[in-house]
Image: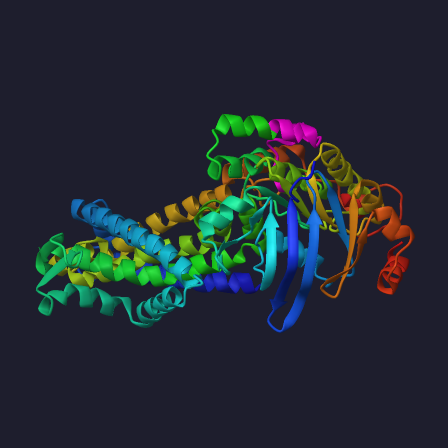
Amino acid sequence: MAAVVVLAIAVYILYTIGTAIGNDRTGLGPHTGWLVVEKFLFNGLIFRGILLTLELTALAMLVGVVLGAILAVMRLSPNPVMSWVSWLYIWFFRGTPVLVQIFFWFNINLVLKSIDIGIPFTSLWLHGNTNKLIPPFMAALLGLGLNEAAYMAEIVRAGIISVEHGQTEAAQALGMDRGLVMRRIVLPQAMRVIIPPTGNETISMLKTTSLAFGAGVTELFTRQQQIATATYDVLELLIVASIWYLVMTSILTVGQYYIERHFGRGATRQLPPTPLQRFRRMLFTFHAGPPAPPELVPAGPAVPGSEHR
Amino acid sequence: MTSMPMVKAEAVHKNFGRLEVLRGIDLEVNPRDVMCMIGPSGSGKSTFLRCINHLEKIDAGRLSVDGELVGYRQRGDRIYELPDAEVCKKRAEIGMVFQHFNLFPHMTVLENLAEAPVRVKRESRAVAADRARRLLERVGLAEKVDAYPRQLSGGQQQRVAIARALAMQPKLMLFDEPTSALDPELVGEVLDVMRALAEDGMTMIVVTHEIGFAREVGDTLVFMDGGVIVEAGKPRDVLANPQQERTRSFLSKVL
């Protein structure tokens, strides 16, 4: 009963908004708004925005995962300086808004005119102009990636400490050094704990890249905003962007399932079925026909669950 | 022939904070000998075993394997702890079998056996895999090469763990209560493998509650309590005719 009420409310809301968009304010007849959505859904500028969104997501996650793993290992290091530096990094980057961080990198050239990287007391120095080294895309990447690293560090750390200490001892007893133990024994097992939240982080990152709008990066959100400013089809273009964000996050969700399955090997006696295998099995059981109702089971005392024997 | 002892402990002390776990252990294990250690839980026997391959640091005394200090280097009168890489080299010569097997669950049985020889000793994959197969045959699990540890029974897992330790061709094998986590009917198969290993001349230190095994296979039996060796000798003598009251009362409970 509750389900029917919920469904009715959902349908009503969707119908109201849907027809409102359809009617639009132009007075050009029904469905105008949806035609606008259709028109811009496969627009070239939108596509270029999608490409940049994907690029930014992938690179920011790469920075986040690599730096996060390093930070996690530092945090667990017996050396107090290492763990303290890591703690400070996480405290700072997790404690300030991403948008602030993106703006910070975008505006860093106001105070820092050039960047010099090299080895002290030698002539091995790289010199670069800040404006050239940190264009808007780089500012967004730094903001998103460095922030993500703080979150990933905690995720990786949780993964590492979830692996039983006996695993480390067994590997050490075989003569493996700390690096080998981490790379070959602990991290592969930590993956089972690390992957699901990392999948969530990636999906979240895909949407958070829209904050690159603040740095003027022409990713999906900025593109739809640009078109909407020109055509006044504000809501229609938000729908176009939403559709594409949904398509991308859906694909990531499926990908995450298969990666989890890969790292789960050895964890259970049998791998869980893929959606395709599950679908086939479902078809097969349909052909086998429904099981006999319990009351038709002949003789014997009526024990609950006895039909499963 | 007077040979150097494989393991030599002199006044080994170990504390966990203010708790003294080992209060001066002196013992020698000769090559090809099997030493069994018994004693109540908390007596320090497992801790001593873990000190032998430096999984635990010792706080005082000297512990050497095959004539070399483990985890430390002596320079003049002072003793320094070795860097990780050096400790690893020494550990690679000492096999260890744990109560809870500690097989690597994300690797197949073959990969469990080949991992350390390939990564630590830089053996070729083919050589390591070849030896792994022969070892699995020796512990009666030739058909399980491609299985994952969780698909095996406890007894099978422990036999794989023994084979994994042997894959490094150790000089010495340490067993830390190898049958304590097993169902009673699976204990026999593990003890059989250990017995065969002893007959082949492997030097072994076995922390165990299996008095029967200690009597049959052990060359010496050590009874520990409260961080010290209370009594040691030929297993038959210690078991049949214990000299110390503490040994007598422990044996009366377990026999």
Locate residue A19, reporting x and y percent. 31, 59
Q: Nearer the viewer, residue B55 or B52?
A: B52
Q: From where the camera sits, is residue A11 visible?
A: no
How many numbered circles does the render carry?
0
For the C terminus of chain B, the quadrant is bottom right
Locate residue B220, reporting x and y percent. 78, 47
Residue at the image point whose x is 33% and y is 48% from the top:
A248
Quadrant for residue A113, please give it.
bottom left
Locate residue B31, reporting x and y percent. 68, 40
Question: Does residue B197 belong to the magenta stretch?
Answer: no
Locate residue B231, reporting x and y percent. 80, 57
Q: From where the camera sits, is residue A15 visible?
A: yes
Residue at the image point whose x is 84% and y is 49% from the top:
B211
For the N terminus of chain B, the quadrant is top right
Residue at the image point whose x is 31% and y is 71% from the top:
A92
Q: Is residue A295 left or right of residue A198?
A: right
Quadrant for residue B150, please give it.
top right
Residue at the image point whose x is 73% and y is 41% from the top:
B33
Q: Nearer the viewer, residue B165 or A200?
A: B165
Q: Is residue A296 above or below residue A226?
A: above
Question: Does residue B137 belong to the magenta stretch?
Answer: yes
Colour scheme employed for the rendering of this structure: rainbow
Q: Is residue A308 left or right of residue A127?
A: right
Q: Is residue A97 left or right of residue B111?
A: left
Range of the magenta residues?
B133-149
Q: Nearer the viewer, residue B238 or B99?
A: B238
